[in-house]
Image (cartoon, rainbow, N blue to C red):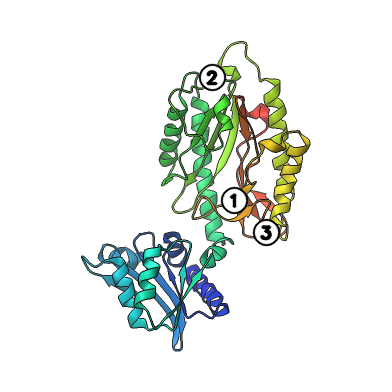
Amino acid sequence: MTSFDSRRDRLRHLLKEKSLDALLVTEERNVTYLTGFTGDSSYLIVGQSPTGKRELLLTDHRYTEQLESECPGLELAVRGPGVKQADFTVDTLTKLKLPSLGVEADTMSVGMFEKLHEKLSATKLARTENLVESLREIKDEGEIGEIREAIRIAEQAFAVIRNSLRHGRSEKEVADELEYQIRLFGGTCGAFPSIVGVGPRAALPHGRPVRESKIGDHGFVLIDWGARGRLYHSDLTRVLTTAKLLPRQKIEPKLQEVYGVVLAAQRAAIDAIRPGAIMKNVDAAARNVIDRGGFGKNFGHSLGHGIGLAVHEQPRLAPDQDRQLAAGMVVTVEPGIYLPGWGGVRIEDDVLVTEDGCEVLTSVPKELEACAV
């Protein structure tokens, strides 16, 4: 049995709990997770019939050869030229005569749902949420290996960028070079558009790099970057001090203070990560350190998120999350303090929940002294 067979069997178990005969999987990454197929414009039907398992991938002629290598043995329904995907889906489901069908409510369009509701009068439709996503939370060894590879690529690219930082390079130049280096080291692309913020622009948690802001204009720069390997992602953030690029400049005391609080907060959160830990309590471990440091109102986002086929996925380390962590989850831990007009500090690592604690998968140094360029 392949990992994809196992995943589809676990999904069938969830469907049985919800008294559903099948699920129409329309979210592209969920199709990939359940089949290994890396194309697009394809849906998957997973279910259980009285005569056995039901699995059918709805695709088009562009992918038939690719599917033979990526998903050998998977039954296909192939639509012809000029046939609309929605119409083909309705026709296929009509022939299957399913008594009940779950749909992915978070990703299916209203138009598609209404079309199914109109045409499949004999099928009971049920909106579902996070069925496949809940399976994706726990990574198997193959997935963890792919995340490790995405981290390796990101860290190698960052090492090149760090060694090439010069006074006068723009934020955008640095971000563009990061993307280039990620691809040179084997990545498919960046996990997301890299964030590069010099000085006061580091106070923008998701600020876009600009040409006008230059390395060395202020004493530090925040870089948030990641790589997509084959399919899986990494996500890191570091603050580099750039005072050495200019004569007679030193690390300012305020940066030392803020950085120290953020680093202590991150370490407290990582120490709290283990199977069974409540997600909001991990968030609180970092938030309490920042509160005691006097910067509580300047930490305005949740502590972290899951990472995998998507760069942001379940679970979440946030104040509203009462769920428990489990072995196999991979989460970011990224506390931050943002002071408008001065700048911001965020430190982010990717962390695997293990059977008896956790493992920090990322290895870029983060002591302030080690972040000088």
Please determine whether, in this image, residue 302 is positioned above or below residue 294.
below
Is residue 36 found left or right of 341 in the rendered image? Answer: left
Outermost residue on the right side: it is 292
Q: Quadrant of the C terminus?
A: top right
Q: In the rendered structure, which disc, 3 or 2, sits on the residue that comes first in sequence?
A: 2
Location of mark 3 (residue)? 325
- Residue 296 in percent (x, y) is at 72, 38
Name the residue type under label 2.
Gly
Residue at (54% x, 73% y) in the render = 10
SS at mark 3 in the image = loop
Location of mark 2 (residue)? 216
Please determine whether, in this image, residue 25 is positioned above or below residue 152.
below
Asked if disc 1 and disc 2 are in contact, CB closer than 8 Å, the reply is no
- Residue 332 in percent (x, y) is at 61, 48
Name the residue type under label 1.
His
- Residue 92 in percent (x, y) is at 32, 77
Which quadrant of the figure has residue 201?
top right
**Gap between marks 3 and 2, in whole Å?**
41 Å
Please determine whether, in this image, residue 21 is positioned above or below residue 329.
below
**Gap between marks 1 and 2, in whole Å?**
32 Å
